[in-house]
Amino acid sequence: MRLHRDGIENVRAIPLPEAIAAEGCGAAVAGAALVTWHSSHAGMLHQVYLNGRLAGATLDVEQRQFVVQPPTSFLSAVRVEVVAVEPQDAHLDLSDELDPPPTAERIRLVVLRSQTLPSGASLNLYFDGGAGAVDYGKPLNASPIPVWPCPQDKAGFSMARFGEGDFGSDGAACVGFGKGRFADGPFGMDADAIEWISPPLPLGRYRFGVKVLDAGGNESPAGETAAIAVAPAARPAARLSIAAFNPQTHQLTLRVSDE
């Protein structure tokens, strides 16, 4: 790997308000933040990543701070990562070498709506509830999800409704430029997909399974995902103020508010 995360400690992100009011608090929502850190890497530059995306790199090997413009949200926190790199790699986006961050609260499943799936087919989704083994006794969806809710989406060799089934459908509403199995991916019709987003999930690791049902109710073997880690982000405080300060013990008490 070209990036180094060991030896980097005490990473801090300090909001920089647009102005300071008379009482000393920020007069506007911060649009930038100062990221500071300690590093044992000599002769190397440092990169800052926000939510897995490159925000910038230092210009001097002694520099241990960097100003970034993080995304602002009162519903999720921003993941800040600092890594050390060789000077010749400082301009490169090395985000593919970072560990993927855990999924936050919701999981999105994408099922390829292949033209090989028969007319009248439907899907059922299942999951393990965090227990490790997928429970196929009760689907997550209230009713089977139709693969072809519109008959024109299914491709065939005949024109319009000349014949029933796969032969008769003409694929008039299909996405892509290819016919049938002419090409997979963005060019062909098989670029089409069905997406499903889960409700908010608590902290844990989850596995999901999908089964296809034909028009007669016969189920296909299950296709399962690998374990997916879910780590809901802490909700940032809307307002942080000083409640009290004890000069004898040097103890500062903060007041946190969601309003």
Image (spheres, rainbow, N blue to C red):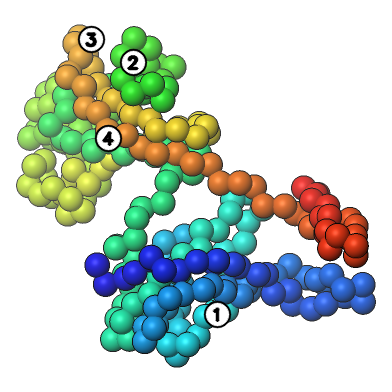
Q: Earlier in the sequence, mark 4 or mark 1?
A: 1
Circle 2 sits in a helix, a strand or a loop, which is it? loop
Image quarter hosting the N terminus: bottom left
Q: Please name the amino acid that badge 2 sits on.
A: Asp
Q: Around disc 3, counting alpha carbons within 10 Å, would you say few (fewer than 14), some (14 to 19), or many (20 or more)?
A: few
Q: Earlier in the sequence, mark 3 or mark 2?
A: 2
Pick the front one: 15 or 73: 15
Q: Please name the amino acid that badge 3 sits on.
A: Gly
Mark in front: 4 vs 1: 1
User: Given contact means CB atoms under 8 Å apart, are the residues at marks 4 and 2 in contact?
Assistant: no
Is residue 235 left or right of 258 when viewed as pictured?
A: left
Above or below, 172 against 143 in this view is below
- The residue at which mark 4 appears reads as 226
Query: What's the CA distance linking mark 4 and mark 2?
Result: 15 Å
Mark in front: 1 vs 3: 1
The residue at 17%/19% (across/down) is 221
Circle 1 sits in a helix, a strand or a loop, which is it? strand
Residue 222 lies, in percent from the top left, at 21, 22
Q: Residue 241: in sight, yes or no?
A: no
The residue at 42%/22% (across/down) is 129
- For this orientation, the residue located farthest to the front is 248
Pick the front one: 172 or 69: 69
Q: Earlier in the sequence, mark 1 or mark 3?
A: 1
Pick the front one: 118 or 198: 198
Q: Earlier in the sequence, mark 4 or mark 3?
A: 3
Residue 151 lies, in percent from the top left, at 26, 28
Query: What number is the disc on residue 135?
Result: 2
